[in-house]
Image (cartoon, rainbow, N blue to C red):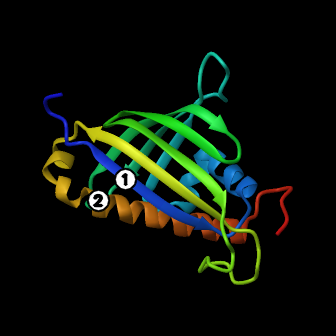
Amino acid sequence: MAGESRVFHFVSTWVAPAPAEAVWRVLAEVEAWPDWWSGIESVRSSAPSTDAEPQAAQVVVRSPLGYRLRFTLELTRSEPPRRSTFGVRGQLRGSGFWAADPADSAAASDATDGAPVTRMRIGWCVVSDRRLVRLLAPLARWAHGRIMAAGSAGLARRLREQPPAGLSR
């Protein structure tokens, strides 16, 4: 479509120092993302999902390049605590996924005590109608990497400091 950026394909890998159930619980609290994920300015969630209306959340991200992106994530499929897919609409449009699998704690740099570790893959396939994003497209991979690295570090910190209720480590 005219006025859109090229398609961005991003895949990030996070290693979280907790079992997949704990990771799922933290990620499911979307309105709390700004508390632990630097770069996420705000998240406003819709009502919990039903068969007729999937859960959606309006997200505002501040790029390390200085601009803001506003978009809606709409959960399209959920297989707790292992996988989910989502649609993206707004200043970003497309789709994404996240998938969680147990990781070898001995191989994970953040887990040295043998505690459960989850390896997550988060993928995005999006375009943007923001003129600034189109102009700065060569820097988009770097900016995305910075935001996702902040999310990975923030999630690990959150899981260590405030484990979800009902899950002991």
Q: Secondary structure at mark 1?
A: strand
What is the x, y in percent for residue 111?
67, 78
Q: Quadrant of residue 110?
A: bottom right
Q: Is residue 64 visible?
A: no
What is the x, y in percent for residue 153?
54, 70
Left or right: 2 in relation to 40: left
What is the x, y in percent for residue 142?
29, 64
- Image: 119 above or below 113: above
Q: Viewer-proximal residue, 81 or 29?
A: 81
Mark 2 vs 1: CB contact within 8 A: yes
Q: Is residue 93 visible?
A: yes
- Image: 86 above or below 136: above
Mark 2 vs 1, N-terminal side: 1
- Image: 63 above or below 54: below
- Image: 8 above or below 88: below
Q: Which mark, residue 130?
A: none
The quarter of the rendered structure image containing the N terminus is: top left
Query: What's the amino acid at mark 1?
Result: Phe
* Number of callouts: 2
Query: What's the amino acid at mark 2?
Result: Arg
Q: Secondary structure at mark 2?
A: helix
Write down the residue under mark 1: 10
Taking the spot 47% from the left edge, 66% from the top edge, the residue there is 150
Local crowd at mark 2 within 10 Å, few (<14), some, or many (≥20)? few
The quarter of the rendered structure image containing the C terminus is: bottom right
What is the x, y in percent for residue 39?
42, 59
Residue reaching furthest to the bottom? 112
Q: Which mark, residue 141?
A: 2
Taking the spot 86% from the left edge, 56% from the top edge, the residue there is 166
Taking the spot 50% from the left edge, 36% from the top edge, the residue there is 86
